[in-house]
Amino acid sequence: MAERKVLVADDEIHIIHVVTIKLRNNGYEVISAENSNQAFALACEEKPDIIVTDFQMPGMTGLELVRKLRQNETTKDIPVIMLTARGFAVEDKEKEELEISELLSKPFSPKELLRSIEDILYQKAVMRNN
Amino acid sequence: MKSARNLYLIGTCIVLGSVLAECLARWYYCGGACLRLAGYVFVWPLFYFVAAVDVLLIGWYWLRLTIRIKSIIKELKSDKISRIKSDGGKIVNELSEAINNRFDDNIGYITELEQQIKDLQIQIRLSQGQKRNTEAIIYSIRDAVIVIDEFDKLLMANEAAGKIFNFDYRNSQHKPISELISSEKTKAGENEFVDFLCQSRQSKMRHTRREIDFSDENASKTFDCIVSCVYGEQERLCGVVAVLHNITREKEISQMKNDFVNHVSHELKTPLASISAYSEMLVDGEADDEQTKKEFYSVIQSQAKRLNRLIEDILNTSRIESGLIKVEKRPISLTILIEEQLQMIRSYAKEKSIKIIGQKPIVFDQVYADKDMISQVVINLLSNAVKYTPSGGSIKIEMEVDEIAGLARVSVTDTGVGIPKDEIEHIFDKFYRVGANKRQAKGTGLGLNLVKQIIEKFHNGRVFVESEPGEGSTFGFELPLATAEAVKV
């Protein structure tokens, strides 16, 4: 099976670092961005299997990034997991509308993040096969 | 009267006697000569005497009668007059008495009326006094007050109301409130207020309350409007009082607090997220080699320090505001203090590839200050500079001494995003964050406020800022030199 690619977008370098190590240790290729613009450019260029993004980032917020991704033909179907330090920052309506697969509150567990990524990619694979 | 009647009887008897004697004489004459002679000698003189007396008596009697009649007439006249007089007096008396009685009644009534007038005058004076008091109270209230009658016409308004709704509050009495406040040109807030006033009057509810937004393109304005119906006798509605309290600032503060809680929770959770994730990785054995483990421990340590710094910021702000903080001033070297803080910030700057240019030349002068507090000031200025400077930028910290003014001046210059000119005056306000830069970096809006309070409130110094959007900013502070401060003490 080909190595699955994950884009991690967070302005906290330590979060990128810890998520990168966790995912790489579990067979994922990780690319990272420190802000939303950089993340969008990388998503268009690298076409990752899944994107893990922070909610609050300098410049464009995580929500704005997802909205932009959904409007782009090449990135509109990429599943997104959003990390947020503000539990109520994203409403259910927005989550549904922007097809955000999972919302994880900070502080989060890298194990839990890995499990969510695997579940989402598995469902995506099943749907594709069907 | 009796004597006249007797005389009249005597006279009558004499005349009758004379007539009888004449008759006898005449009879005798017809008879004998003796009798005739006797008649001539006695009867005739007597007859004539009696006749003369009779005439005299009759004349006298007539005279008396005339006099008497006159007297009686006079008497009658005088009696009538006196009667009339007496009757008239009685009438007059009665009239007078009636008039007096009536007058007394009227006097009582008038007195009563006078008393009532006095009472009314007192009441009017009291009412006027109360009105003046009420006006003085209403005019001196900062909140806007509007009083309307049952026909929605203005009775009273104060200056604040005039300012809000832009009408002459002293000369607008009895004008319909809708004309004064609401028109086609007025904004939604004013129209909503007029509708609210009229609805409250119609609903006859004692008190109603509503928050109304009077914001326009120039300023944000929110008022808490309380409308109370005023009832007179028999529960008849006689007016409505509206009080408008400006809660714009309260709303802003509330919003600031909410933002603050959000910021703080986010700021606290971010280092906590790193600590939690790295700890879990260590526990799960994700760090294979010693080098990675050391790296993880280092991150946990730095994030714990960051967390502590943040909590210290919050606590210090709270302590400073409550006046509980203990200030321990002593002569300290700013050069050494700055160097210590630079050591702390270098790793953070290195992460963002920001160059730090240290102070030159070294200054040996000391300032009279609390070391922990000034350390906090310097680290806040340095960390802000790093936070708002893009990767590859530079930060320069300088110190100079003005011996004439007896001041030490420290400045931190960055090549960061800068601050728009209209926001510079608010930059030291608590919780204030530059709108355009909010997304540039996370923050609580407490750091610069803390700097200002420490320098100006506790050290008799001064903070300053210069900035050019897109080019960078210079933040700094001035503190009295230890010698100058010692001279003052």
Image: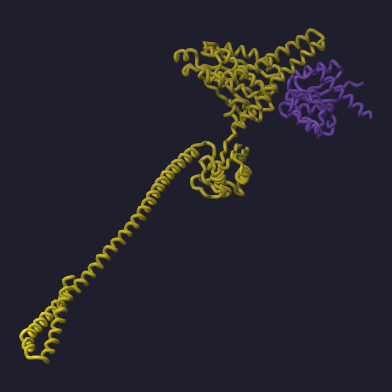
Chain colours: A purple, B yellow
- Residue found at x 51% / y 44%: B156
Q: Please determine whether, in this image, residue B322 is positioned above or below residue B13.
A: above
Total tally of numbered discs in the picture: 0
Q: Which of the 4 quarters of the picture holds residue B370?
A: top right
Q: Nearer the viewer, residue B351 or B137?
A: B137
Which residue sits at x=69%, y=19%?
A: B268
Residue B63 image position (x, y, % from top left): 15, 76
x, y percent for residue B12: 16, 79
- Left or right side of B127 for A35: right
Q: Residue furthest right?
A: A130
- Please state if B436 lies on the left or on the right of A123 as rendered: left
Q: Residue at x 21, y 71 (%)?
A: B72
Choose between B362 and B293: the one closer to the eye.
B293
The quadrant the N terminus of chain A occupies is top right
Q: Position of residue B129 (x, y in %)?
A: 44, 41
Residue A43 appears in view: yes
Quarter location, residue A33: top right
Q: Is residue B440 left or right of residue A7?
A: left
Of residue A29 and residue B211, the one placed in the foreground of this image is B211
- Furthest-bottom residue in this view: B30
Q: Give percent across and percent down for residue B288.
A: 82, 9
In the displayed structure, B175 sits above or below B420; it is below
User: Against B217, is B90 above or below?
Assistant: below
Image quarter of residue B409? top right
Can residue A67 be seen in the rendering of this structure?
no
- Quarter holding the C terminus of chain A is top right
